[in-house]
Amino acid sequence: MFQIVSRRSLSAILPGLLVALTALPVPVAGVQAAARTRHSPALVVASTEPQLGPAQDAAFFQPFTRATGQPVTRRAWTGALSDLEPQGGGASAWSLAFAEDSTIRAACMQGLVVHLAGSATNPDGCGAPGLATQLVVAWDQTWRDSAPRWNDFWDIVRFPGKRGLRRDPRTTLEIALLADGVPPAQVYGELSTPQGVDRAFRKLSQLRPYITWWSTPAEAASLLSRKQVLMGSAPREAVDSIATHDGQVRIGVNADMALSYDLSWAVVAGQSAERLGRSRDLLHFIVQPDRQGAFVAAMPAGPSGSGHPAALLPMDVQFWQVNYAPLSRRFALWLRKAG
């Protein structure tokens, strides 16, 4: 469970990207059906990661439109599964969804997205890998140069100020245990016990008066860029997207003991047959190696890390697939008591 990996490992998953789509039939006309699709309604891509939109436009959506005549538009998504409920199959229906792998898997289990072909890296066919990323400690470097760690995150005496945390039990409970001294390799074993869950919530309660919650990567980045928090948990790509050219915003990143997780693509269920075919064409286009390479090249360059390989805790998707519902209820109850 505990491993040493590089900051971004998208290149490592490129060979397996096409395998998940082998059962998706591509129409004979494929991406050369420009005349047929030129006047089709836009395909709608819903994403919980709007900060990646410009890179996705450059690498995926604009080239796809040039090749096929099929327009593509983006929509911000909070990750709420209710938003994926059948929308009548009309022109405004969502075509693809891009989100955290655990969100895509939950949608898959509820039949809200299409099952793709299984593979060694994607045995249940729930989504196609899109990006390997991290949830890191990010902080305002105008406050200090040296990188804080999760235990510093809880040290209000030495480092007074607000903290940004995700309003979700995923990653937040893991961070609480890491800050409480649980070794990374034991985090999910601890969370699998009632005593471990109690321990995580006790640790959160210590920090409760100082927490400013965020729900989307854009919110996490905004808290940091507007100096509303001294430090916060944040997706690495969200931190990378913060503009720093004016010298007023200096955000540092400590990826040591970060949580690594995957973002995945999925085809939204409930579309008309014709629209479903075009949505599949778009996903097939996105996962081509040359398009993935273009995406990596278009990604924003963010602040550098500590200069040595970071020790990451991979997010356990299977754990959250089983435990997300009960821990979400416990988290919601804790938040109400906090209010």
Image (cartoon, helix red, strand yellow):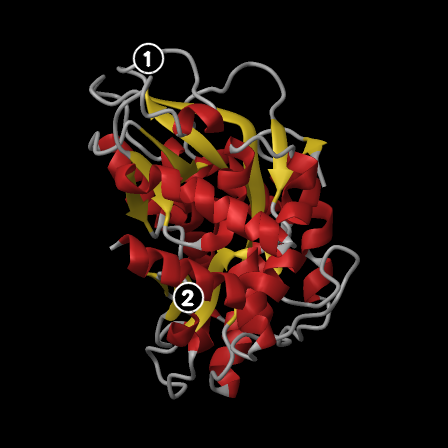
Q: Nearer the viewer, residue 194 or 72?
A: 194
Q: Is residue 4 left or right of residue 98?
A: right
29 over 122 or under it: above or below: below
Is residue 336 visible in the rendered image? The answer is yes
Q: Secondary structure at mark 2?
A: loop
128 over 36 or under it: above or below: above
Is residue 32 visible in the rendered image? The answer is no
Residue positioned 60% across, 51% down in the render: 195
The amino acid on which the numbered mark 2 sits, given as a three-letter code, is Gly
Q: Is residue 162 left or right of residue 300?
A: left
Q: Residues within 10 Å of mark 1 (few under 14, many from 20)?
A: few
Q: Nearer the viewer, residue 68 or 250?
A: 250
The amino acid on which the numbered mark 1 sits, given as a three-letter code, is Arg
168 over 54 or under it: above or below: below
Q: Is residue 72 left or right of residue 243?
A: right
Residue positioned 63% across, 42% down in the render: 187
Going from N to C along the chain, the mark reached first, 2 or 1, is: 2
The disc at residue 24 is none
Q: Position of residue 156 (x, y in %)?
A: 32, 25
Residue positioned 60% across, 16% down in the render: 308
Q: Position of residue 328 (x, y in %)?
A: 46, 63
Residue where numbered disc 2 is placed: 69
Residue where numbered disc 1 is placed: 144
Q: Position of residue 321 (x, y in %)?
A: 61, 64
